[in-house]
């Protein structure tokens, strides 16, 4: 049998073991508000750094995409500039491959009547170059010859004359004549690339422009009504001569032209 004194002593010890014996823990708070500590735990404080980190990563990703797009755009523009520079360089190389053209050999003669009388007997050797017009004679090079020659004269008034050489490959060996108004000739020349210098301001000629066109003799007004004008030029290679008889500067007068063009060995 237990002693009454022992039971009382045990009960006294159990009573002394209360929650108040543990520091920081209050019995009423623990009993009536068991979720207080969980409610005071603010999870947003731990999620804020995660959100900021995600924003930073997204910002870095966007910056990377913008940088990549800018780099691609710059690369594309660089390629375009490189292509343009390459085309210009190619054109310059093509021009550099063309040998320089020697000046023509020219002369004049007082045998004006004799030439006119002779050319009147030949077909298509006497033509009228109307006011404002330009007559261009296309003379291709031929393997059988080594130079081109010309002679011309006019009745009453002067006429502009010049020579150019087109380095384009020859596809037709026929000598052809092209008549154009000065405005038509100017429009055709504006479509071509490059530029060849002008001559005298009164010559009436326009800019001769072409990547394959070279100037041998600029167009100047010649006193072909006073003397025969003639000359020759050695073939620089394969191509086509352009002999221009220019009356575009004349507002009122048509010009009667006597001319002949021929080859020489």
Image (tube, helix red, strand yellow):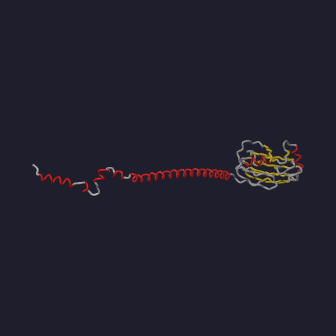
The location of residue 74, given as percent across then percent down, is 57, 52
Q: Nearer the viewer, residue 174 or 81?
A: 81
To which quarter of the image does residue 120 belong?
A: top right
| Residue 12 sits above or below residue 123 on the image | below
Q: Nearer the viewer, residue 248 or 2?
A: 2
Left or right placement of residue 216 versus residue 94 in this view: right
Q: Check the image and name the residue furthest to the bottom.
A: 23
| Residue 81 sits above or below residue 124 on the image | below
Left or right placement of residue 223 versus residue 190 in this view: right
The location of residue 220, given as percent across then percent down, is 81, 54
Q: How many marks?
A: 0
To which quarter of the image does residue 26 belong?
A: bottom left
The location of residue 126, given as percent across then percent down, is 86, 45
The location of residue 250, given as percent across then percent down, is 85, 51
């Amino acid at each position: 049998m237990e002693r009454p004194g022992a039971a009382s002593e045990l009960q006294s010890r159990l009573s002394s073991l209360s929650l108040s014996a543990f520091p920081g823990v209050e019995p009423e708070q623990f009993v009536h508000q068991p979720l207080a500590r969980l409610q005071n735990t603010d999870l947003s404080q731990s999620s804020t750094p995660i959100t900021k980190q995600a924003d930073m990563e997204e910002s870095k990703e966007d910056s990377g995409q913008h940088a990549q797009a800018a780099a691609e755009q710059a690369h594309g523009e660089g390629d375009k500039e490189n292509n343009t520079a390459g085309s210009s360089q190619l054109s310059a190389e093509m021009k550099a491959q063309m040998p320089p053209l020697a000046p023509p050999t020219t002369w004049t003669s007082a045998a004006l009547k004799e030439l006119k009388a002779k050319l009147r007997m030949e077909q298509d050797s006497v033509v009228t170059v109307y006011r404002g017009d330009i007559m261009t004679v296309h003379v291709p090079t031929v393997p059988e010859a080594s130079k081109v020659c010309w002679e011309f004269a006019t009745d009453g008034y002067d006429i502009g004359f010049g020579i150019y050489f087109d380095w384009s490959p020859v596809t037709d060996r026929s000598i052809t004549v092209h008549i154009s108004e000065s405005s038509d000739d100017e429009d055709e020349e504006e479509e071509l690339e490059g530029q060849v210098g002008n001559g005298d301001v009164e010559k009436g000629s326009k800019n001769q422009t072409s990547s394959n066109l070279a100037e041998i003799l600029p167009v100047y007004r010649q006193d072909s009504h006073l003397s025969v004008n003639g000359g020759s030029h050695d073939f620089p290679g394969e191509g086509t001569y352009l002999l221009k008889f220019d009356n575009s500067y004349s507002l009122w007068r048509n010009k009667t032209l006597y001319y002949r063009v021929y080859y020489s060995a």
